[in-house]
Structure formats: structure tokens, C-alpha cells
Amino acid sequence: IVNVNGEEYITSPEKNFIALSEEKFGKGVQNEVKVKAISQIDDYNSDYSETYNFLVLDDVKNLSHNNGKVTWDSVVGATSYQYKVNVQSPIILTKETLEYTQTFDQKGEYEIEVTAIASDIVDEDGNILCHCFGSSSAKLVVTKLSAPENFQYKNLFTWDAVHDADSYEIYEVKDDNTEVLLGELKNISYKLSRDIAVGAHRYKVRAIGNGKTTITSDFSALKTVNKLATPTGLRVEDGVITWDKDPNAVTYQISFSGYYDGQKYFDEFYEESRDKN
């Protein structure tokens, strides 16, 4: 007869073991087991053996991730935890350590696994109070989003949608490399204000994750937008209208207006290639 936590189970004579199962043994709690041999005559049954105390580790619970910090609940009987990401070598953490700061350098999936490791519970003199064994683990998958691709400007900024992105952030990068957030967007376009200073301006965009199962992406490639200066040196030379060339201009738009007796009587517009001024 095997007595498990006060419940008796009868085994056959040829079996001197009983399988561990959750129906008989609680996980995460101390179990008491003792056994006695049964004779064909009740008067000759043995006494119960010395009680054997043991604990089977409970599952790792509430494994979660929030903006780079992975946390989990303490597991009774665990003396350390093994932390592993994908195929990297595991890291051993003390039983008091219930969190780990994870970096996400590359885009893609990160499978995070935390395993509780058991060891016997002893008193101050080293006497075993409870035998602990087993290991339990939990997993979660966190995905670092891909950086937006095809970031371009033509009257407005556009880029390709990123799967699982919650939103997007677009920044201007100043000459001193400081970053200024221009907008937090749900769509994949941004209308740039026309009221920007003359000169070159650099921009970049990134996909924003929820901070739990998805991580914010790296930035896209920089895109430079040039605000052109007003043409200078407009003049007529030998019957030809000319002006100073701007190396960043794509084309030039020329407007002619005719006046007679103070009244405008025509407007005409022309475009010339960048090579002609």
C-alpha cells in the first residue's frame, strides 16, 4: 500500500513503484509518501516506512514581455532559472532573479524560454527537508518588426506597410543628428509642411510594435528632401531671359504676364529642363 498525502493506493506484489501523476501528486506543493508491505494475513502486514517528502516543480507561470523586460512568477522549489533565446546558449539566473532585460538587434522572431531548475530543500545543517525534482518551462514568441521599405517622397512621404505594425513614427534628423518626431501615424503616408527652411532636410520612418509581442523596428533608410531657394539673377541678355542655375532643380517653371494700360491681359507658363536657365 502506498500512502500519498493521506490517500492509499494498492499496487500488485511485483510492482515496487507508483507512477507520478498529477491525480496523485500535487505540483508546486510538498507531497508526503510512505509505503507498507501487505501480507496474506493482516496481522503480519508491515508498518509504514519513514515518510518521504518531495516536491515536483510547478509550471513557470505568467511569462511575459513588456518593452524589453521579460518577467515571470517565482516557482516554489526552484533554485535557479535557465533563460534561453532561440538557439543561443542558455543563461543561468538565481532563484531571486525573476526578470531579464532582452535586446532585439535583428528583425524576426525571438522564442524566449524560461526553465525552473530544482534542488533539494535543506535546513541550516544541510539536512534534507524535502526532495525537489523535475523542471518546468514556459515559452513566448516576440517579433521585432521589419523596417519600412520603399520610403520615398513625391509631394508626400510614402512607404510600404509593415506586417503587424500598430503605427508608424516619422522623424526629421537635424544637422547635429538630433531627431525630431514629426508625427505618429496609422496610415503609410505623411504630408510634409511646405513651410520648411531652404536647404536639405533628412527624414526617416519606423514601424511601432505593441511592446509585448511585437517590437518597434529599426529606422528606414534616410530620405533627403531639398527645399529650393528662390531663383536669383533673373535678367534679359541679348533678347534671352536667363537666371542663375540651381543644381538641385529638376525643372524650371517660367511665368509670363502681359500688361496694357495697367491691366493684365495674359498669363503664360512654360517649363524648361534643369539644364536650361
Image (spheres, helix red, strand yellow):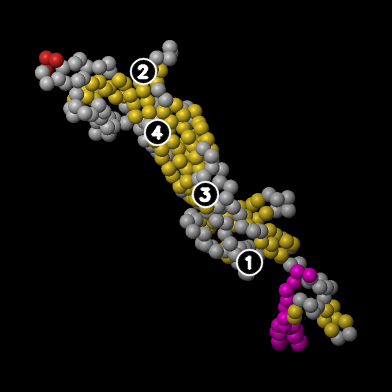
Q: Distance between the residues labelled 1 and 3?
A: 26 Å
Quadrant in the picture for residue 8? top left
Point out the residue furthest to the front here: 14
Q: Where is residue 65 in the image (x, y as percent from the top left)?
A: 47, 42
Specify start and end residues of the magenta stretch as a single range.
247-271
Q: Name the residue under label 4.
A: 135
Q: Name the residue under label 2.
A: 129
Q: Which residue is drawn at 85% across and 81% down?
A: 236
Q: Which of the pair 193/204 is nearer the observer?
A: 204
Q: Name the residue under label 3.
A: 215
Q: Do the residues labelled 1 and 2 touch (CB within 8 Å)?
A: no
Quadrant in the picture for residue 123? top left
Tell whether position 248 is magenta: yes
Q: How far apart are marks 2 and 4 (CA)?
A: 19 Å
Q: Position of residue 107 (x, y in %)?
A: 55, 52
Disc 1 or 3, which lies upstream in sequence?
1
Tell whether position 185 is magenta: no
Q: What amino acid is at disc 4?
A: Ser
Q: What amino acid is at disc 3?
A: Ile
Q: Main SS of the magenta segment?
A: strand
Q: Distance between the residues labelled 3 and 4?
A: 29 Å
Q: How far apart are marks 4 and 1 (CA)?
A: 55 Å
Give neighbour class at mark 3: few <14, some 14-19, many 20+ (Cα, 10 Å).
many
Q: Name the residue under label 1.
A: 153
